[in-house]
Image (cartoon, rainbow, N blue to C red):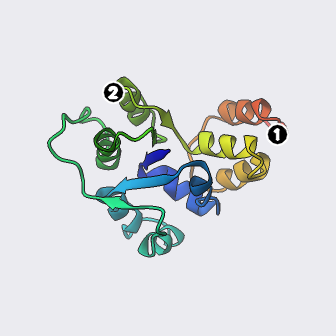
Amino acid sequence: MIAVSDTSPLCYLILIGEVNLLTRLFDSVCVPHIVLDELLHEDAPKAVRSWAADLPSWMPVHENPHGFSAPPARLQAGEQSAILLAEKLGAEIVVIDEKAGRRAAAERGLRVTGTLDVLSEAATRDLIDLTSAIERLRETNFRYSPALLRATLERFGGKRMPR
């Protein structure tokens, strides 16, 4: 299965030490060049920049797509390019966290997943301990609804999180 990723899911999976889950869930994870640029940006965390400076072979970088009808302008450049690249490649799934990006991708008929979905799927395959992964995610600046995290843990058999 081919996936195309936006920047934020990669950042958070790198920060919690779980980016290699992507290779266990997908055959290939592609990114548009603008996502690589965002991963390498001076404002990105050092761990993210370091990882992106030496990309693994399972993550091909594609030129930013041109010539396709663009998603709404309210999206960030990485989200727009990820959606367009997913369409161009006929990818089975696009990995985006931001609500507007997820909505735009879904409206264009793309299957969408995000950081929490990746962690949840990995947990169902016994690849990670979901509670531990979410605790590490909470130590980052990942924006989440506490109710969503509780529901995710409860749905996948994890311990209840404090309210």
Q: How many numbered marks appear?
A: 2
Q: What residue is disc 1 on?
A: 158
Frontmost residue, 3 versus 99: 3
**Quarter of the figure with the C terminus:** top right
Residue at horizontal 71 percent and vertical 34 percent from the top: 152
| Residue type marked 2 | Arg
Q: How many residues crowd around disc 2 within 10 Å: few (fewer than 14), some, or many (20 or more)?
A: few
Q: Is residue 64 above or below residue 74?
A: below
Residue 13, picture quadrant: bottom right
Label 2, secondary structure: give it: loop
Name the spot of residue 31 as percent of width and height, x first: 38, 55
Q: Earlier in the sequence, mark 1 or mark 2?
A: 2
Q: Horizontally, is 140 left or right of 101 in the view?
A: right
Looking at this rendering, what residue extends furthest in the left direction?
67
**x%, y% of residue 55?**
45, 70
Which mark is nearer the camera, 1 or 2? 2
**Residue depicted at x 48% and y 54%:** 28
**Mark 1: amino acid:** Gly
Q: Position of residue 52 (x, y in %)?
A: 44, 69
Q: Secondary structure at mark 1?
A: loop
Crowding at mark 1 (Cα within 10 Å: few <14, some 14-19, many 20+): some
Relative image position of residue 159 (x, y in whole percent): 85, 40
Q: Is residue 150 above or below residue 49?
A: above
- The answer for how far apart the CA atoms under marks 1 and 2 are is 33 Å
Q: Which residue is mark 2?
A: 108
Query: Which residue shows up at 60% across the image and 48% down it?
Result: 25
- Contact between marks 1 and 2 (CB within 8 A): the answer is no
Q: Residue at x 45, y 46 (%)?
A: 2
Q: From the viewer's perspective, is 151 left or right of 66?
A: right
Taking depth in this image into account, of 40 and 94 the one nearest to the observer is: 94
122 over 73 or under it: above or below: below
Q: Which mark is residue 22?
A: none
